[in-house]
Image (cartoon, grey):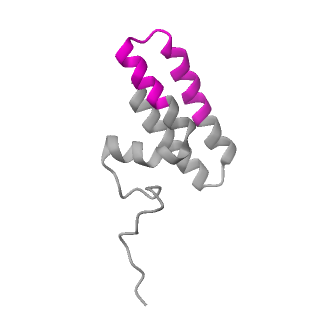
């Protein structure tokens, strides 16, 4: 369930950040990290590697959009990588 927790934390954190609730955004990430770290000790070797990846992604915001897109194939989310060009063009 580490992947699902990480995906949820990224999404909720980003929504809060977009609504200018930086403290709430950070609290969501910290809570997810606490949960993942608590479960890391009891995890099997394969699960432990998954949890370690999730922890790394939550701590490095530059990896979050790619992680989200890779697992859900949602490359059109509002917080997709900023270096990608927008699908929509403004017509004048």
Q: Nearer the viewer, residue 55 or 26?
A: 55
Query: Residue 74 at what x, y percent from top left?
Result: 33, 51
Question: Does the magenta stretch mainly form a helix, a strand or a loop?
Answer: helix
Q: How many marks?
A: 0
Quarter placement of the C terminus? bottom left
Task: Determine whether, in the image, residue 68 is placed left or right of residue 26.
Answer: left
Please tell me which residue is depicted at 51% across the width and 22% down the height of the picture: 36
Query: Residue 15 at what x, y percent from top left?
Result: 54, 50
Please tell me which residue is depicted at 39% across the width and 30% down the height of the picture: 3
Q: Quadrant of residue 19?
A: bottom right
**Residue farthest to the bottom?**
92
Task: Determine whether, in the image, residue 53 is placed left or right of residue 60.
Answer: left
Please tell me which residue is depicted at 46% across the width and 31% down the height of the picture: 54
| Position of 44 relative to 31 (above/below) | above
Query: Residue 32 at what x, y percent from top left?
Result: 54, 29
Q: Which residues are magenta?
A: 29-54
Q: Nearer the viewer, residue 54 or 10?
A: 54
Task: Determine whether, in the image, residue 13 is placed left or right of residue 46.
Answer: right
Determine if the magenta segment contains residue 10. no
**Residue farthest to the right?**
23
Query: Residue 6 at what x, y percent from top left?
Result: 46, 34
Quarter placement of the N terminus? top left
Please tell me which residue is depicted at 61% across the width and 43% down the height of the picture: 25
Q: Nearer the viewer, residue 72 or 83?
A: 83
**Residue farthest to the left?**
73
| Position of 7 relative to 37 (above/below) | below
């Amino acid at each position: 369930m580490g992947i699902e927790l990480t995906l949820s934390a990224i999404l909720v954190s980003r929504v809060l950040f977009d609504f200018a609730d930086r403290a709430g955004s950070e609290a969501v990430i910290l809570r997810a990290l606490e949960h993942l770290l608590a479960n890391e000790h009891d995890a099997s070797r394969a699960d432990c590697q998954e949890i370690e990846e999730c922890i790394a992604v939550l701590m490095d915001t530059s990896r979050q959009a790619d992680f989200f897109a890779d697992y859900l194939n949602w490359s059109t989310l509002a917080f997709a990588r900023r270096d990608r060009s927008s699908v929509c063009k403004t017509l004048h």
